[in-house]
Amino acid sequence: MTSTIKSLAQAARHDMLLAVRCRGCGHCANFLAADVAKFANSSRPLEAIRFVCSECDGRDIAVLPSQIDRDRARNILVWRPVRLK
């Protein structure tokens, strides 16, 4: 299923989780695709969404969509993007 997801809108429609990993330092964070779609253009491809690593300020980021298995009890830390005024 994840190989057919090309845009942020598709990932949000399927209620997917985005694993965002910095290629520089390996830091990883999880976001809900619907939350990211509120701040980014949802028609853009996943690899075109800009993230900045909070650990090393790197911009070489990989975005991997994945299904959320809500039936299994897993502890997943999900970050929520916010706009500061």
Image (cartoon, rainbow, N blue to C red):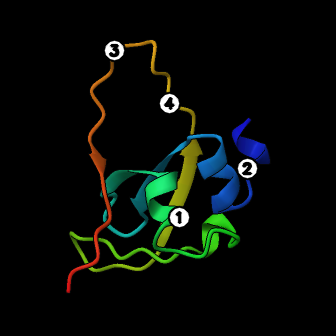
Q: According to the image, label 2 marks what residue?
A: 5
Point 34% across, 58% down: residue: 26
Q: According to the image, label 3 marks what residue?
A: 73
Q: Is 57 rendered above or below residue 5? A: below
Regarding mark 4 in the picture, which secondary structure is present there? loop
- Residue 17 in percent (x, y) is at 49, 44
State the separation of the CA atoms marked 3 and 4.
Answer: 11 Å
Q: Is residue 76 left or right of residue 3?
A: left
Q: According to the image, label 4 marks what residue?
A: 68
Among the two numbered marks 1 and 3 on one chain, the one whose residue lies closer to the N terminus = 1
Residue ranking furthest to the right: 4
Regarding mark 2 in the picture, which secondary structure is present there? loop
Instruction: Mark 3: give few (<14), some (14-19) or many (20+) Cα within 10 Å.
Output: few
Regarding mark 1 in the picture, which secondary structure is present there? helix
Among the two numbered marks 1 and 4 on one chain, the one whose residue lies closer to the N terminus = 1
Point 42% across, 80% down: residue: 59
Q: According to the image, label 1 marks what residue?
A: 37
Q: Amino acid at mark 2?
A: Ile
Q: Is residue 70 left or right of residue 81?
A: right
Q: Which is more foreground, mark 1 or mark 4? A: 1
Q: In the image shown, does 75 or 25 lie closer to the viewer?
A: 75
State the separation of the CA atoms marked 4 and 2.
Answer: 14 Å
Among the two numbered marks 4 and 2 on one chain, the one whose residue lies closer to the N terminus = 2
Q: Is 68 rendered above or below residue 57? A: above
Residue 84, quarter of the rendered image = bottom left
Among the two numbered marks 3 and 2 on one chain, the one whose residue lies closer to the N terminus = 2
- Residue 41 in percent (x, y) is at 60, 76
Among the two numbered marks 2 and 1 on one chain, the one whose residue lies closer to the N terminus = 2
Q: Amino acid at mark 1?
A: Ala
**Mark 1 and mark 4 residues within 8 Å of each other at the beta carbon:** no
